[in-house]
Structure formats: C-alpha cells, structure tokens
C-alpha cells in the first residue's frame, strides 16, 4: 500500500507504544524514534494498557485492540492483528514473538506482505509454562520460521538453534541499550558500596541463587523486581527481606532513577538463563560496570565472553567478594562492547534493511 511513496510496515505482538512494558516495546519505540523517511509504521496496541489512546506516536499510527497483549491472551491478540492486516495490506508485517503464528500459514496464503518475524527467546523452553503451552509455542515457532520471509534472532545462540533445528539462516539483531544513558540530568554520581540486579521475578532468572549468595556474604545487594506479581516472588521477598545487606525493591520504571542507581552501584548481577539477548543486561553494559552474569550461552554471546560468570551460589559469592583491578577493567570492556554492538541507530538500520 502506498503512503505517499513510503513503505507501510505493520508491527504486531507488543503491548504498544509509548513503551510501558518490556524489550519488544522498547524495540518498537526505537524503530519509530529512529525511523527513516521511507517508512510508515502502523503499531497494534492493547487498549488495556493505555488510558489515553492517542491515534499517533510521532510519525506512527496506533491501532488499539480490546485484548490484553501478554500471557495466553497474546494468542487471540496477535491473530486478530494478522486478520486486520489482511484487510489493511501492509507492505511489510513485522511480527514480534510467535504467539499468533498459528495463523501465519493462512496469512501467507492470502497476503502478499513481506513477513519478518522475531521469534523471541525460545519461549517454549521457559519453566513457567505447562507442557501443553510449551507444545503450542514450539509448534508456533516452527510455523513462524517456515512461513516468514525473514527470521530475526536476537542472539547468536538463538541463531545457532534456528540453524540446527530448522536449517534456516536467521538475521542476528540484538537490542540497543543507549536509551538508558539518555536522561535529562547526567550527574557524576559517586560510586556506592552495593551491587544491583533488575529483572522480572521468575525462577529461570536464578533469583533464589542470587539472594542466597548475598545472604552468605556481607556484600550489599539492591534487587529490583515485581516481587508481588506471584507467590514465588512474595515468598522470596518474605524470606530474604530481613537480611540487613539485602534490599528488596519493587519495580522502578523511572529511567532517571535507574540511571542514578546504575551509576552508583559497584556491579550488576544478571541471573537470566534463557531468552536470548536480555535488554536489561544490554542496558547495564552501557554504564561500564562489572557484569556478573549467569553462565549460559546467551549471556556469553551478549557479553562477548568478557563478563564475570557464575553457575552456583558459591561461585557468585566468591566473585562478589573479590573486587580488584581485573574486575574494574572488565567493566570498561562491557562499555566498549555495548558501544560497538548495542546502539539503537544500528539496530534500526538492520531492521529496515530487512523490510526491503
């Protein structure tokens, strides 16, 4: 469809923009923020997440659906988005995640749109899903790879899996993290004597391992997360809140507050064990602080084998208690990698090349 000579790109699979949720939402917002003049974005949004439903965000058009975008409801949300796309006939359909890809064979049959799909981080492997949901997500992933014109992996580890499992070469495009540095008042905060961790409170993020390691140490930890969102989180909060060196903090979405904490902390502890390239890790790397990452292939690819890795309570405890010149130097290496690999301008350019 011709929008004054621009390429019409429909984007589905996220809560929407302005970003108020996670990595995919930040990706879409930056696609719009850094878009070239040849692109016209139409973004599907969940009406449940926005009290004010603006028709536009910058140069992008917003279309609201009365369905929640996350959890099981993401399936009808994404399928309805694809059905609407059949009528709107975008030049490119950018699908983020595989929830609605059960409908992709039909969409492929009746649409001439170029389909670009980011398959996310092997969602079907996550511990939080039951066996039936895992089977469904794995099947959806298979359909996404088969019926897309281009497949995006956000981590080389995901790309290796796609090649081994399906014999398909995917495009490796991670996330930018430089937005974490873009605050109005960039003060030179003095380093404080605490470690920082920020994540969703889920078992696969090794929350209990991290908290236990610090409970056995005198080193201080500030742990930010959605502790009240599940019984798992509430139980851990109750169990570890009484330790004087562990501060349990509810979610913080103010980027200026996060900026201050990242500037002040002595290191960042990252426990994610699944999901490809994690946006919070990429953001932390921008600050040039030492990164203590759970030892898995995704984190090693993201940090170019240059972080400090742990795989047990004891290895993490030993690492946090040894803060020397080597540790400080590793932080500078993180900043260099982030500058080279995780900048939004470069990420957007790579996506736009796939739209051609």
Image (tube, rainbow, N blue to C red):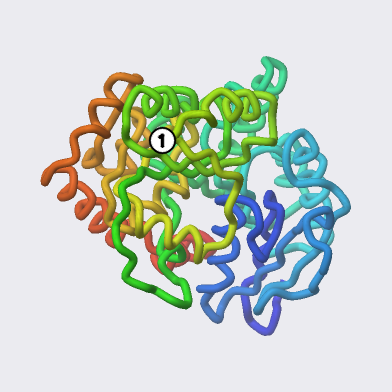
- What residue does disc 1 label? 245
Q: Is residue 166 visible?
A: no
The outermost residue toward the bottom is: 4
Above or below, 334 relative to 326: below
Using the image as rendered, state which of residue 47 and residue 7 is in the foreground. 47
Judge left or right: residue 94 versus residue 196: right
Using the image as rendered, state which of residue 12 and residue 104 is in the foreground. 12
The outermost residue toward the top is: 131
Location of residue 215 (image quadrant): top left
Tally the marks: 1
Q: Is residue 104 visible?
A: yes
Identify the residue at horizontal 73%, vertical 36% (top origin).
71
Q: Secondary structure at mark 1?
A: loop
The outermost residue toward the left is: 325
Judge left or right: residue 221 versus residue 36: left
Location of residue 319 (image quadrant): top left
Identify the residue at horizontal 79%, vertical 44% (top origin).
79
Q: Quadrant of the N terminus?
A: bottom right
Percent x, y for residue 60?
68, 73
Using the image as rendered, state which of residue 216 and residue 139 is in the foreground. 216
Percent x, y for residue 194?
35, 45
Location of residue 233 (image quadrant): top right
The outermost residue toward the right is: 66
Above or below, 126 relative to 104: above
Judge left or right: residue 46 versus residue 13: right
Identify the residue at horizontal 36%, vertical 43% (top origin).
195
Percent x, y for residue 26?
56, 58
Other residues around mark 1 within 10 Å, as few (<14) / some (14–19) / many (≥20): some
Percent x, y for residue 192?
32, 53
Identify the residue at horizontal 66%, vertical 23% (top origin).
129
């Amino acid at each position: 469809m011709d929008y004054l000579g621009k390429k019409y790109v429909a984007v589905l699979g996220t809560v929407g923009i302005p970003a108020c949720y996670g990595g995919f939402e930040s990706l879409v917002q930056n696609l719009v923020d850094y878009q070239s003049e040849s692109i016209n974005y139409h973004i599907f949004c969940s009406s449940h997440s926005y009290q004010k439903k603006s028709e536009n965000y910058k140069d992008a058009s917003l279309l609201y659906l009365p369905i929640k975008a996350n959890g099981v409801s993401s399936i009808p949300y994404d399928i309805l988005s694809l059905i609407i796309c059949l009528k709107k006939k975008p030049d490119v359909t950018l699908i983020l995640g595989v929830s609605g890809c059960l409908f992709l064979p039909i969409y492929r049959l009746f649409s001439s749109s170029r389909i670009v799909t980011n398959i996310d981080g092997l969602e079907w492997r996550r511990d939080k899903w039951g066996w039936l949901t895992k089977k469904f997500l794995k099947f959806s992933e298979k359909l996404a790879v088969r019926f897309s014109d281009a497949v995006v992996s956000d981590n080389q580890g995901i790309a290796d899996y796609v090649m081994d499992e399906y014999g398909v070469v995917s495009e490796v495009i991670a996330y930018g993290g430089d937005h974490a540095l873009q605050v109005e008042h960039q003060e030179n905060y003095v380093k404080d004597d605490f470690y920082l961790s920020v994540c969703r409170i889920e078992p696969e993020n090794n929350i209990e391992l991290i908290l236990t390691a610090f409970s056995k140490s005198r080193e201080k930890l500030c742990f930010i997360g959605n502790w009240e969102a599940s019984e798992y989180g509430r139980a851990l909060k109750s169990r570890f809140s009484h330790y004087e060196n562990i501060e349990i903090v509810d979610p913080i979405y103010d980027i200026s507050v996060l900026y201050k904490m990242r500037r002040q902390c002595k290191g960042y502890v990252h426990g994610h064990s699944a999901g490809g390239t994690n946006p919070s890790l990429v953001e932390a790397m921008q600050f040039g602080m030492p990164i203590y990452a759970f030892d898995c292939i995704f984190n090693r690819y993201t940090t170019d084998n240059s972080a400090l890795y742990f795989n047990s309570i004891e290895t993490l405890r030993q690492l946090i208690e040894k803060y020397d010149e080597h540790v400080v130097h590793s932080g500078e290496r993180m900043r260099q990698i982030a500058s080279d690999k995780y900048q939004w301008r470069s990420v957007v350019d790579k996506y736009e090349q796939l739209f051609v």
